[in-house]
Image (spheres, helix red, strand yellow):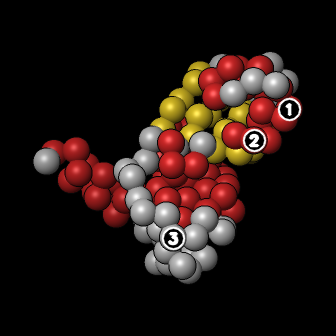
Amino acid sequence: MLLANEREAEELTDRRGAAAVDELSRRFHVVCVKQGEEGALMSWEGLVIRNATDPVVEKDPTGAGDAFNGVLLASLVAGRSPGDALGSACRAGARVAASYETWPERPRSFEEEKEETSGRRRR
């Protein structure tokens, strides 16, 4: 598994975005490239998953990548699907970037998060 930001992925491949993910997926079974406010791209054993977060006003990005990585890994270990894990990770990174705190609120359970996301889609 490789977790990288856009700059790191570009340094490793001389490519950007989906092209970088495609190149890296030839070397790693799971690749996740964080794209800041654009969300993230993940290649999970060849399946490319894109997740865009709801826009936030960035206050301090310190710790956003760490929050993303931690939530992604914890979600996958807990048995969540790659798409659900990626969505949770993007939301966690966005919450941190939108705050001056490194962990601005308690982590939500999968059920609470699913309920919140479902409610947003119905509007």
The residue identified by callout 1 is 12
The residue identified by callout 3 is 59
- Bin the neighbour count of mark 2 within 10 Å (Cα to Cα): few under 14, some 14-19, many 20 and up: some
- Element assignment for label 1: helix
Residue shown at the point (23%, 51%) measured from the top left: 120
Residue shown at the point (60%, 65%) measured from the top left: 61
Q: How many tags in the picture?
A: 3
- Element assignment for label 2: helix
Task: Answer above or below: position of 43 versus 3.
Answer: above
The residue identified by callout 2 is 7
Q: Earlier in the sequence, mark 3 or mark 2?
A: 2
**Residue type at the position of mark 2:** Arg
Residue shown at the point (82%, 25%) measured from the top left: 14
Where residue 93 appears, as percent x and y from the top left, is 55, 59
Task: Answer above or below: position of 83 versus 23.
Answer: below
Where residue 57 appears, as percent x and y from the top left, is 42, 63
